[in-house]
Image (cartoon, grey):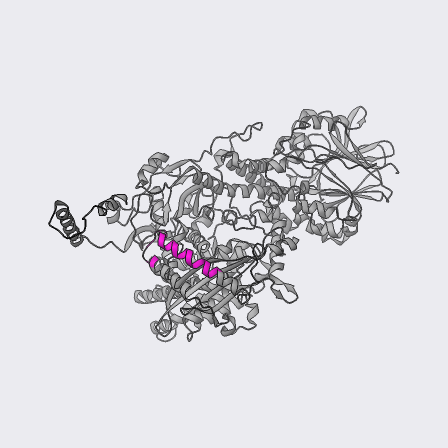
Amino acid sequence: MTDSDGGTADPGAGAPGPATSATIAAEVAAKTRRDDARRAVPAPRRRRLQIYALDPMRMENTGAGFVTPRITLSVPYEPLAPGPVGQRIQVVDYDGARRTFYEPVDLDDPHLLLSDGLTPSENDPRFHQQMVYAVVASTWEAFEAASGRRIGVRGGPLKVFPHAFYGENAFYDPTLKALLFGYFQADERDAGANLPGQMVFTCVSHDIITHETTHAIVDRLRPGFNEITNADVLAFHEAFADLVAIFQHFKLEQVLVDAINERQADLTTAEAISGMARQFGFASAQKAPLRTALDDTPDPGAYQRTLEPHARGVILVQAVFDAYRTTYLARVQDLLRLASGGSGILQAGRPHPDLVNRLAQEARATARLFFDRCVGAFTYLPPIDVTFADFLRALVTVDFVASPDEDSFRTAIIEAFRRRGIYAGEAGSLADRAVALPFTEMSALLPDAVSLLWTLTARARGEFSEASADERAIQNQVFPQLAWWAKQNAVELGLQPHVDKERPISVAAAHSTVRIDVDGQPQVVTVLQVVQRRPDLAVADRRLGGIVPKAGATVVIDAAGVVRYVISKSLPAAWAGGDVRLDELARTVDRFDRSDPRAAYRSAADGRMRVNFALLHGGYTPVEEE
Amino acid sequence: MTEPVRVRMYNVGFGDCFVVSIPGPERDHVVLVDCGRHSGTLMDEPPFWDVVERVVADLPRVDGKPTVDVLVMTHRHRDHVHGFSREELWRDVRVGEVWMPWTENDADPVARGLKEQQDASAARSFHALRAFGAGARPAVDIALNSITNQGAMDTLRGFGCPVRYLPDPLRPQGTVLTGRAGGGLGLPAGVTVHVLGPSRDRATITLLDPPPGSAYLRMVPATTLDVAFDAAAPYDSPPLDVPRPWAGDWDISRPEYEARVGAGGAPLVDDDLLAHLDAAACADAEGLAMSVDHALNGTSLVLLFEIGKLCLLFPGDAQWGTWKAMLANPDWEQKLKDVRFLKVGHHGSHNATPVEFVEGYLHDAVAMLSVSATAYETKGWKEIPKDELVEAMQAAGRLDLLVRSDKPAPRSPRVTSDPGGFWTEVRLDVDGEP
């Protein structure tokens, strides 16, 4: 910058005068720029990349033999260095087990730009890099589309290590902000459709990539969920990531068509749709997909009994998928009647290709609705201590706000959750209006902060880069205002008055987004995550093992600065003669103390009660049932 | 019997070695409970093998031979059995019976399955962790503790005496062993031993199966497992010999990689990131090591000795699963309330002594806690022993005496210490009142 400053400091520069060599040069340069601009083509919006449809194990009988189906994903275009390394997704192929790097793929190579990237191959690490990049980017985009804003751009780039270690695992590491994928040899004795002893790469499994990416995004949406404060937290992480992976299946055209050809109308029963991580499951001696979303005979008592996080998470996955199935089947009834001469029962065999297309459309649209609602629910989730009931209420609320008159989604959700013993206890009713969160009209008087936040959201559009200096300046202006406001209104937010060190209140996150309201008008929505640490309670309550309990509230504010929703996790949380939240925290700490193998060596307060996906996915989790 | 029972705790550092001397009509009968030290014990004062030699030298002689009436191995962890890995030290010792948990019985298919799983997981986590260098050493020690300890097991099975696997599969909830009159080897008349664990019920067995599911089993390539490691230098390990995962050679060095990615900006990788990456990948193996550790602790033989009016409880390193089953058994409730001697489980870690027992059962007892003064400080095992547990046990009325191997012995006429620092001993009255 000193060069150009030096130029303008030259006496007489910029003043009108006779043409000098300098002004002529400037005119020539300007003309060249104009010519360049005329010749230039706009940057593409999309980049197309080939991937495996689901994973390398899925075979498809084409009539002429079995092939591994591929699919081409379309992801947002950004210039990529070899890696691929972009602004917010950086694939780094370092193998910790072999202490070596692998040749990075250059997706901006003209040959690869012409051929939608490399052809799928298990034997080429550069294809692995391409696939992991494509699926991470696609999942990320789906989240941003559903939430109407850029997510986590400011949280630094997500690093992705496709061959991080040798082992039957893959996980998101919140400290590194990185996805780590392992590879391993399939079971020697029985590897399902894998070759016995074949190398299995978790980084080319669509489900596993999507699942891990979701963990990374949830970490950005709700960092407070990284603390294990009740029996649902770990299960929620797993369930939500599985749901995203399953609803992403519906974006894979060929998978949908195959499923409909295989199962006719009710494609949800096809393993490719409702199963999770087939190759991994078969390779790891489980001899089945890792998990399934399908459950015809729900057990309403299972939720109370089941504490192992994966098993408990499956209950939530199956509840949402059950609602999906109900909704989808209701939506295609007319098609089925039309195609069957009124009976609604199709003839045996493959359905007509037109019908297959229409069914696939409905399946995809319904999946999109469910995905949008699941992501949209985050607006109405508390900042900490999430439970299945919180998710239920948030799902119903987001549906109410988005479509006040059409209630089929929320009634299907409430019913499917009810069949599995998951209720919104505080609602006191199964009616959708009761399950939806209560509406408030508290005046917040925060129009300045709200409009500044909106400026940030609007500016982030189309950019993946980190915050610029003036954006940081806006943040520095907004957050103190928000914190001041939260402290002033602590009691209204369900918190205790702010006291430095003893009960400090802070704003953990704030963002704003826009949606089109039912009347067609844009509605700016601002969401704050307010957290109050309670070290005073940690000292008083020895059952907590030194864990500092937290209260918190998610605050939803409209464009006029009026608070519409307050979703609180209070402390104390008096309910039926005890403090429900502290009691549950104490029970959770106790359960981990008793059955967490690390408990002998590391205290609860020493980070042991933070979510650790390496251990969670590795199969280590306290399994003791109460 | 008016002579007191003596319980001697040998100072093995982070490990257990207890000798119970029970007066009989003709001689003192001896029960030896465990003899081992954790590789995580940095302290070597007194040197471990000197302690083991002292244990043997201190044994009473019968017909001129050092004699153990009952040798109890609570569970197959190095910190409980390593002393037996030098067979020559035990060659002259006569043993009446060896008792082990049922999970060591190779004739029992369930036990064999568990053991295979535990051994494979221990070996895999050990080999995986060794490749992570110095940062993983505490975890390597935990894995090493669980590795088969085959040499020690061979010694224990090689005494030429009966080996009992407990509890008796036909009486899993009520195995009771009683002493015999007469001068032979074994427990004297009037001594009753109740076997309270490990349980054989399904829920408990599940807890003993280290990785729930099979997720860790292929953490290390099978070929690597065949490589014998030098037990004297367990940490010196080459990186894992992981085969190249594909046919072609795509390996490049870090400078080459950086040159390829290039294009200015902040470097993508630095030493710090790679170290963090190792640590993150290592967390998985560490989880496995701790799971196996936990599972093996769960196999602990839990014995309640009834001698006259005196009840002594040796819970090994039993974990919550075993305790829960014990506390739920109404037949044992009174006996557990009568306990006047407690070997504190798992060196005082809190998941080996449940708060229900401390608050609801423990009173007027003597407790011995065998732990190293250095292991938990240098290894970062701050929770062993758990201060809150020790405080809770010392609440009014619960313990008359607490003897810790890492602290000077309390002054009491009932406590004797070896001037050389090899052991501390308590005398316990069998007639009831202390």
* Of the pair A601 and A55, the residue shown nearer to us: A601
Q: Position of residue B428 (x, y in %)?
A: 82, 39
Q: Is residue A159 left or right of residue A309?
A: left
* Residue that protrudes farthest toward the front in the picture: A11
The secondary structure that dominates the magenta segment is helix
Q: Quadrant of the C terminus of chain A?
A: bottom right
- Image spot of residue A284 (x, y percent): 48, 46
Do we see residue A505 in this rendering?
yes
- Give the residue at the far left of this rendering: A18
- The quarter of the displayed image where residue A183 is located: top left
Q: Nearer the viewer, residue B241 or A467?
A: A467
Whether residue A294 is visible to the viewer of this picture, yes or no, is no
Which x, y percent locates residue A594? 63, 50
Q: Is residue A249 magenta?
A: no
Bounds of the magenta segment: A459-483
Question: Considering depth in this image, is A223 or B171 the residue closer to the camera?
Answer: A223
Seen in the image, is B430 located left or right of residue A145? Answer: right
The vertical placement of B22 against A447, above or below, is: above
In the picture, which quadrant includes the N terminus of chain A? top left
Q: Which quadrant of the figure has residue A121?
A: top left
Q: Is residue A465 magenta?
A: yes
Q: Is residue A44 above or below residue B169?
A: below
